[in-house]
């Protein structure tokens, strides 16, 4: 089913309002989800709306949060999200970072007591629009085992770096620090296919190609897959995200991060508040004139984009380009939703007395 | 051959002085190299001394540089290294970052017109000693192909994140963004062994297990190895390092980065000056009281360190621990040097009229 951006946006806003969000929060939260769907990242868009509703039902999401700065210096701050939607808490934090960067060159905000914040790229792009370099990361429910471990201790902990360019679109590196994201496993499960070695391990910690292994106690593997292929580096990146997002802010880290799914209870011995994010903004013209930077970004992009490739039909992909291409198409043609998602959304519509899709 | 730290240090200082470095620069440059050898990162220690000498002979390294800030805001700066040794330019930049962080909470310095800076961890640790989180990265000679490309466009571009802890040693994530570093290929070459799939490709861009492929026009692969295993993420990380280090600072980026080896000439159409670094420091107490942060770091470390593993003899490795263990041993027993390195050093000694090892 194809649905127009505007129809999906209104629908999503209405659900958030029905959950008790004020107008501004509902608009913002919907914007983050719709942006994800527009950009082709279907796993992080309205497909998750149901998940947010369930956490709210369990009183694990507060739709009327008092989001505030609890600690700060000129260029650093910690924000407490008051258990609000990460979809509104993270943009609040990014605004603080941008304001600090406007005044002092850079701004950095660690966030505690938050929830899933959608796609990291949304938040990092807020900085790019101001000619700043944007940084955004978050920890998440533990699904990934460190190298050699048989325990799930880290989330897929994405990190995003976003750079403004001149005539070319911005470069947006937005990546899970695991070898593969959960969404890819779900696709393989649906198609009844095996997954490549290096994505997951079974309950005992042995490498497997069975995409169902995660559901039966297995774990995702860090980027790299195994030690020989550098999984200790993927572990190091996931650890960096966890420490900056949660040890620095006072959120839960590692295996203490509360699960996104409502049917799993959060640990009873929390080490902090909610989940954590870390965002930052750096003014490009804090280092060199913005025009110069952008001109060289364009040169960088074109040199990589036009480099020789093994297969002439597979060009080097500049990070952020596929998402931009999807956005251009979906803004015109509408956003494709699979039946399962449409059904989920219509159940929500019925429940909240909102017009169906 | 085992040589004591102090003997190797004096020897290295003498070589740098003979190259024209002043006392302070010689001491600092030697300290960076010796720290690498102490920490067991043999590829980046005195084994490279000969390489620095050759670049100096080619007038590509200036041993009397006028290192200065050329652009700045309260918390950002660009430093021009005046073609100096990266071993002295990067610590200068890190000092600027730390001073800014002391005053404003964080400090960020992009560096142009520099050379190889040794191990990233040395510079990041300067911040850790001040209860700050340290960041250090550098671009490097192009040896890595982006996903799908058959060209060498990026260096092994390491990134380092370093976090102070309390009773536990600091967590130091210091990693090349390629699947494997060049040093690992050299070991396989020496032993006549094949390397795992996913480390390198041949001249045409096809995956190979021949460790000699790099020397015959092949390339290292980004962390992840191939697209299915997330090499686009490794490419994104390498790109991030390249952009922050060089597009931001005005250094050479991508395939324009001058080669470390003196027998290859730098490109004749440079896009900037020398190679680039990016360093940063953030005060921990800009986010929460330092004691709290450190206590939770210790808790984080112990939880991961003691997690269940597949093989009871292979525990989870906390990033930075193996290097610290090597340092403890080598400070007492001395630093092991292979014959080829000792010979190289003694040739230098003879040339500069310095006492042999």
Image (tube, coloured by chain):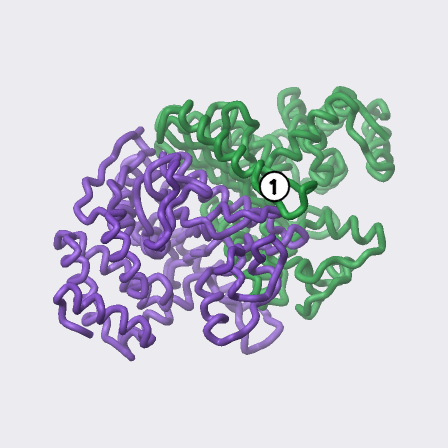
Chain colours: A green, B purple
In percent of width and height, residue B86 lies at: 29, 49
Q: Quadrant of the N terminus of chain A?
A: top right
Residue A205 lies in what quarter of the image? bottom right
Q: Position of residue B46 (x, y in %)?
A: 29, 65
Chain under label 1? A
User: Quick check: B155 left or right of A313?
Assistant: left
The percent position of residue B124, horizontal first and vertical second, equals: 35, 51
Query: Where A55 sits versus A240, above or below?
Result: above
Residue at (68, 69) in percent of width and height:
A206
Q: Is residue A82 visible?
A: no
Q: Which residue is mark 1?
A: A316
Q: Please state if B304 lies on the left or on the right of A212 as rendered.
A: left
User: Which image quarter: residue B311?
Assistant: bottom right
* A356 displayed left or right of B81: right
The quarter in which the C terminus of chain A is drawn is: top right
Residue toward you, B32 or A202: B32
């Amino acid at each position: 089913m194809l649905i127009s951006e505007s129809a999906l946006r209104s629908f999503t806003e209405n659900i958030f309002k029905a959950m008790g969000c004020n107008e501004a929060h509902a608009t913002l939260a919907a914007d983050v989800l719709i942006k994800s769907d527009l950009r082709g990242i279907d796993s992080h868009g309205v497909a998750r709306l149901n998940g947010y509703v369930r956490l709210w039902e369990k009183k694990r999401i507060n739709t009327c949060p008092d989001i505030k700065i609890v600690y700060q210096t000129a260029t650093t701050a910690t924000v407490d999200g008051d258990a609000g939607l990460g979809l509104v808490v993270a943009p609040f934090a990014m605004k603080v970072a941008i304001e600090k960067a406007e005044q002092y060159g850079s701004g950095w905000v660690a966030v505690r007591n938050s929830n899933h914040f959608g796609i990291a790229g949304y938040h990092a792009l807020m900085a790019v629009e101001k000619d700043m370099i944007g940084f955004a990361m978050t920890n998440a429910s533990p699904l990934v085992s460190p190298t050699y471990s048989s325990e799930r201790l880290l989330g897929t902990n994405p990190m995003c770096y976003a750079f403004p360019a001149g005539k070319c679109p911005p470069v947006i590196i937005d990546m899970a620090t695991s070898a593969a994201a959960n969404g890819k496993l779900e696709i393989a499960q649906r198609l009844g296919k095996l997954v490549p070695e290096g994505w997951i391990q079974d309950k005992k910690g042995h490498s497997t190609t069975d995409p169902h292994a995660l559901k039966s106690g297995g774990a995702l593997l860090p980027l790299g897959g195994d030690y020989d292929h550098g999984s200790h580096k993927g572990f190091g990146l996931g650890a960096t995200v966890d420490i900056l997002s949660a040890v620095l802010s006072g959120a839960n880290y590692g295996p203490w991060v509360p699960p996104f799914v409502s049917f799993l209870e959060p640990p009873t011995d929390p080490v902090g508040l909610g989940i954590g994010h870390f965002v930052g903004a750096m003014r490009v013209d804090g280092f060199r004139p913005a025009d110069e930077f952008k001109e060289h970004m364009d040169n960088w992009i074109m040199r990589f984009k036009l480099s020789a490739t093994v297969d002439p039909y597979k060009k080097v992909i500049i990070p952020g380009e596929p998402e931009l291409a999807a956005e251009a198409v979906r803004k015109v043609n509408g956003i494709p939703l699979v039946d399962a998602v449409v059904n989920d959304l219509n159940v929500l519509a019925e429940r909240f007395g909102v017009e169906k899709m």
